[in-house]
Each structure stands twice: as structure tokens, then as C-alpha cells.
Image (spheres, coloured by chain):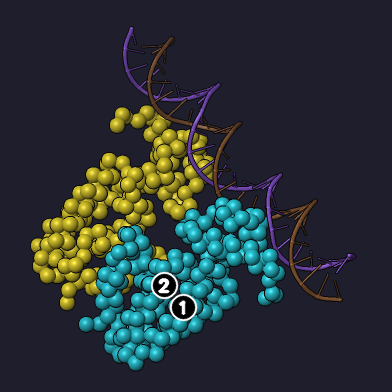
Chain colours: A cyan, B yellow, C brown, D purple
Amino acid sequence: MPTLRSDAARSRARILDAARRQPITELRLNDLAREAGVGVATVYRHFPTVTALVEALTIEALEQLVDEARTAAADPDPALAFTRLVRSTATRQLEHQGLQTVLLSDEVSSAARGLRDELFDLAQTVLTNAITAGAVRPDLSLDQVQRLVCGVEHAVRLGDGSDRDLLLDVVVSGLSLP
Amino acid sequence: MPTLRSDAARSRARILDAARRQPITELRLNDLAREAGVGVATVYRHFPTVTALVEALTIEALEQLVDEARTAAADPDPALAFTRLVRSTATRQLEHQGLQTVLLSDEVSSAARGLRDELFDLAQTVLTNAITAGAVRPDLSLDQVQRLVCGVEHAVRLGDGSDRDLLLDVVVSGLSLP
DNA sequence: ACACGATGTGGATGCTTCATCCGTTTCAAG
DNA sequence: CTTGAAACGGATGAAGCATCCACATCGTGT
């Protein structure tokens, strides 16, 4: 990746800045350009697709999530490690609406893909350990757990977000063995 | 509601027929008109908004769901009644992608609203009974349960749909008290 | 049977949004 | 300072959406 020219870096920052100021669902690139004080073409040059822009907005959160996953994986108690990881994932996904897209989409940059792969590796280990320890239902794959977390995210978003912990708790206890 | 003229009825049927042939997410009304062999205006006259069309497509499923809810509510075992209702709701929602929209949207016809209200009444009763019987967590509202079901639906859709029962079971056991 | 008002039809049309192209400007290396 | 490469911006065309209105069809009353 070649170093960015100074004006290009300035434009990029302005675009990301403006993008952060509006809900991710109504990202109209044309308006975004006006908002950021740059031309439309500039937006499209920096971010060829909407997904690319979303990825740039959420890569930081993804890094943070990977960090938290590492910490969770280091927890000696497999059950605790699992619930911590699930909670972290849900929390980050709720804070950054684009994260789910990046985690599921195929058209992400190699940087995001790298982080995602690392996250999945960690999560797979944590899940396997939790199952081995008898703390979590053994009939679920990582993919299924991940999708359930996305489902909870969806459920929380349908409300005002205040019952995040409660809904998450329902699913976590559903995943756990008594 | 005045009786439909014969040609109007024919057009309406054609439109609904064509609409059923494509995924609800990509309902482009213009193409739909061509597909159905009618003019664009005809589509818009019969169904002023996309939601109106979706509602027409799913009202039958909604009626069926209300029926199932009545049956479930009649079950003498409160716990069984609850899980049956949850399963019915999830199943119907998965079969008819538009159902969730109709259940949550504000801009539905009075017919749909009536059915929906009846469904919610039944569901509220079933939930209250299940809680009273000690079968279900007492700290959840009907709205929260409904949203969780929508969440499961979302999770199933993210996959190929084959693990519907499994994912649903996770949430149901999360809702249940041991 | 038929005439006529009411109801329904179809596609041309204008409007909004999206994304690309290309002439002009800005940067920074030599 | 010169120069070529990189970036900029807005005009532009393509695409979807929903409306409008001139014409066709229905079915009722005579």
C-alpha cells in the first residue's frame, strides 16, 4: 500500500469523519460527499463500494474485538471465557452496526479478513474448550453460535436497546448446559 | 370494501401470483408489472405501498398463525402451550418472509391489525400462564419474546435454514426455567 | 340490447438516486 | 522552477420509482 498524498489523506479523514456522523443504514454517498466538503468522485475513489467504507469505519472496532477475544481465550475457566467472548462480540456488534457486515461479507479487504480469521480461530478454541468442559451444548458449531449472536443483535435493535443484557442472557443460558 | 370488478380481480390475482414467484427482498414493482402482464399503474393502484403488497401476500399466513395460536392457547399445559406458540410463530415467520414486517410495521391495514391484535392477546395470555406456572423466566415481556423470535429467524436466515429447529431450541431453553 | 357513468388500465413521463468519466488542480521529487 | 503523476470535483448518463392522464372495459338501469 503506497503512502497517501497529503491532500488525499485529508480527504479520506474528512469522509470518514462525516460518515461517522450519520446512521450507517442511510449512507448516501452523494450526500456524504457534500457533507464532507469533497467531490463525489473523491468518495468513490477512496471507497469503491459501500462495504469498503463500512469496513474502514469498523476495522478499529474489529481490532478491539480481536483483542478482547485474546483476553477471553486466556481465561482459565472455559465457561467464563465463552460467555465473555459472546458478550464482547454482541457488545461490539451493537456499538458498530457495520461489524456484522464485515464479519459475514465475502468482499472484505485482506486486512479485515486477517483479523476476522484470527477472531474465528480464537472463538473456535474457546468454544471447543467450553464444550469439552461440559459448560456449553456440544451440538452447536461456531458458525451457529455466531449467527445466534447476530440474531440477538437483531432482536435488540428491534427495541430501544435498553434490554441488551437481558436478551443476551437468555441466549447465553440457552447455550449453556445446566 | 366495495366488490371488485372482474378485470380488477383478474389483475390483482395476476400481480399476487407473480409476486409469489420472487424473493420478497427484491420486489421491484416495475418489473413485477411486466412479469404479471399488467401496467405499472395497475400494480400501484392495487397496492399503494410495498408493505400493502407484502401484507396481502402474508395475510393468509397470519390467519393460519392466529389459528395455531388459538390451538396452542387451548393446551392445558402452560409450558407446552408456550413452546408450541413460539415454534409456530418462528415457523410461519420463516416460511413467509413478510410476516415479520406485518407484525412490526405501523402501516398495516385494519384487517391485519385486527388479526395481529388477536395474536398478541393470545400470546400475552399464553406467556402469562407459562410464567405463572413457573415454566418461563418471569423477567421477560411479550415484546421481548417476540423480538427474540425475530432474532432467531434472522439467525436461521443467515444460514441455509437447515438448523432452524436447533437454533430455536437454544432460545426456547434459554427462555425456560430449569 | 344498448347506452352511459363508473371503474380500471397502460405506458409515457418527471423525479430522485447512483456511480462514472474526464478536464482541471495540487502535490512533491529532482 | 519544472514536470509528471496523483487526486480533485462536478457534469453527466444510467436506473429505479411512483404519478398522471388519455383510453378501454365493465356492468347497471332502461
Q: Is residue A10 left or right of residue B11?
A: right
Q: Position of residue A113 (x, y in %)?
A: 54, 76
Q: Residue at x 38, y 34 (%)?
A: B9
Toward the viewer: A73 or B172?
Answer: A73
First reached walking from the N terminus: tag 1 or tag 2? 1
How far apart are the alpha carbons under marks 1 and 2? Answer: 8 Å
Q: Is residue D18 above or below residue A40?
A: above
Q: Position of residue B157 (x, y in %)?
A: 40, 64
Give the quarter of the figure containing the N terminus of chain B. Answer: top left
Residue type pointed to by label 2? Arg
Image quarter for residue B127?
A: bottom left
Q: Identify the secondary structure beneath mark 2.
A: helix
Q: Position of residue A44 (x, y in %)?
A: 63, 59
Residue where numbered disc 1 is placed: A64
Q: Disc 1: which chain?
A: A
Q: Is residue A88 visible?
A: yes
Q: Is label 1 in contact with label 2 (beta carbons under 8 Å)? A: yes
Residue where numbered disc 2 is placed: A92
Q: Is residue B46 above or below residue A158?
A: above
